[in-house]
Image (cartoon, helix red, strand yellow):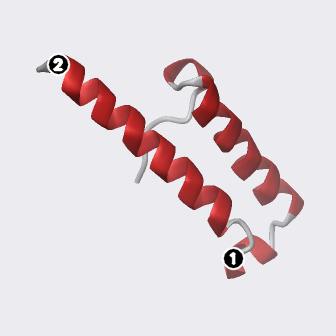
Amino acid sequence: MHTDLSPHLHSEKCNELIQLLQQCRKDYPFLRLFGKCSPEYSKMVKCLKEERLIRRQKKF
């Protein structure tokens, strides 16, 4: 499970990746079940993880 995907919570880079994933899922509602949107999803998760690590480092 990932964080809330609201645009105001993420960087411009991650917002672009979120938009690409949402567009892919909209364009390919059936094929996404077979991995059509997996590359977009992986990029988005990586970006969200980087943001999370940066936020965690700032706390300490």
Q: What residue appears at the point 22 percent right and 19 percent down from the top-left corner?
A: 58
Which residue is at the front of the view, 4 or 18?
A: 18
Query: Which class describes the residues within 10 Å of circle 1: few (<14), some (14-19), or many (20+)?
Result: few
Q: What residue appears at the point 22 percent right and 29 percent down from the top-left corner?
A: 56
Which residue is at the front of the view, 52 or 4?
A: 52
Of all residues, the one furthest to the bottom in this rendering is 34
Query: Which class describes the residues within 10 Å of circle 2: few (<14), some (14-19), or many (20+)?
Result: few
Task: Classify residue 25 as left or right of residue 27.
Answer: left
Which disc number belongs to residue 59?
A: 2
Task: Classify residue 23 as left or right of residue 58.
Answer: right
Tell me the quadrant of the picture where the N terminus can be found: bottom left
Amino acid carrying mark 2 in the image: Lys
Of all residues, the one furthest to the right in this rendering is 27
Q: Nearer the viewer, mark 1 or mark 2?
A: 2
Amino acid carrying mark 1 in the image: Leu
**What secondary structure is found at the residue carrying circle 2?**
helix
Q: Quadrant of residue 28?
A: bottom right
| Image marks 1 and 2: residues in contact by CB distance under 8 Å | no
- Residue under circle 1? 33
**Alpha carbon distance from label 1 to label 2:** 38 Å
Task: Classify residue 16 as left or right of residue 43.
Answer: right
